[in-house]
Image (spheres, rainbow, N blue to C red):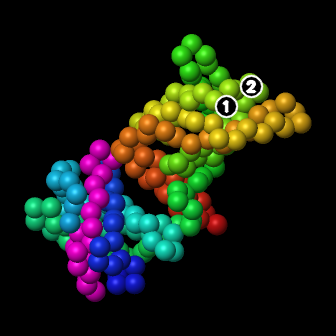
Amino acid sequence: MRELVKNDQLVTIVPQDFNNTNRGTVTDVSMKGFKMKLQYKPEGLIKNLICDFYSLTDNGYLYFESYIESIEDNILSVANPVKHRFLQRRKFTRIKFLEDITLTYEDITHNASTLDISAGGMKIKTLENIDIEKEYHVSINLSDEQTIKCRYQLIRVEKGDNGEYTISGRFTHLNNIDKMTLVQFCMKKDMETINKN
């Protein structure tokens, strides 16, 4: 564990209920696991239930599953993970994601389809000429239970020979819970893809 997690390292813990996502700083590392001091009260965090953990390191995102051995005030003792994985070095894991969406700005709407997505933004395609200067509202259905609502700011627009526009953009006004949901979603899908290969 000492090679993966170090004192003062920032770690995010994501339980099954994303609303109880928390983060903290590693205070002690041993052969059996590590302790971390949470920034917020450990509401919804339960001992012995598997949670997802991630931390940005020099080698990319460290991602692993483990469980909480004990909770004392804001201090968690976390068991050593059986397996871990370093995800892509880029800031957020980007995955292929195909979904129809609608971009709205006041009374203007544009239909588009997503190509890929990360917690930072997404790439879309559309036949409509979209004003790059405007910031659009968008709802993204990750599943039947999970919908992300935020704003989408266009960064780059390319027009293909077939008249179709490919647009790259970033998310703005994305709250922390939705960002964690997106990070979690992309990591899970990325792991599933890696395990298939």
Q: Tell me residue 154's x, y (percent).
A: 63, 36
Task: Return the residue at label 2.
Answer: 129
The residue lying at 10 percent from left, 61 percent from top is: 73
Q: Is residue 176 above or below residue 194?
A: above
Q: Tell me residue 13's x, y (percent).
A: 32, 59
Q: Which mark is residue 132?
A: 1
The residue most toward the bottom is 31
Front position in the image: 73 or 10: 10
Question: Element at badge 1?
Answer: loop
Quadrant placement of the C terminus:
bottom right
Front position in the image: 53 or 25: 25
Q: Is residue 128 above or below residue 145?
A: above
Relative horizontal placement of residue 148, taking residue 161 as reference (left or right): left
Q: How many marks?
A: 2
Quadrant placement of the N terminus:
bottom left
The residue lying at 48 percent from left, 56 percent from top is: 188
Range shown magenta = 18-36
Q: Which mark lies nearer to you, 2 or 1?
A: 1
Residue 113 sits in quarter: top right
Mark 1 crowdedness (10 Å alpha carbons): few <14, some 14-19, many ≥20: some
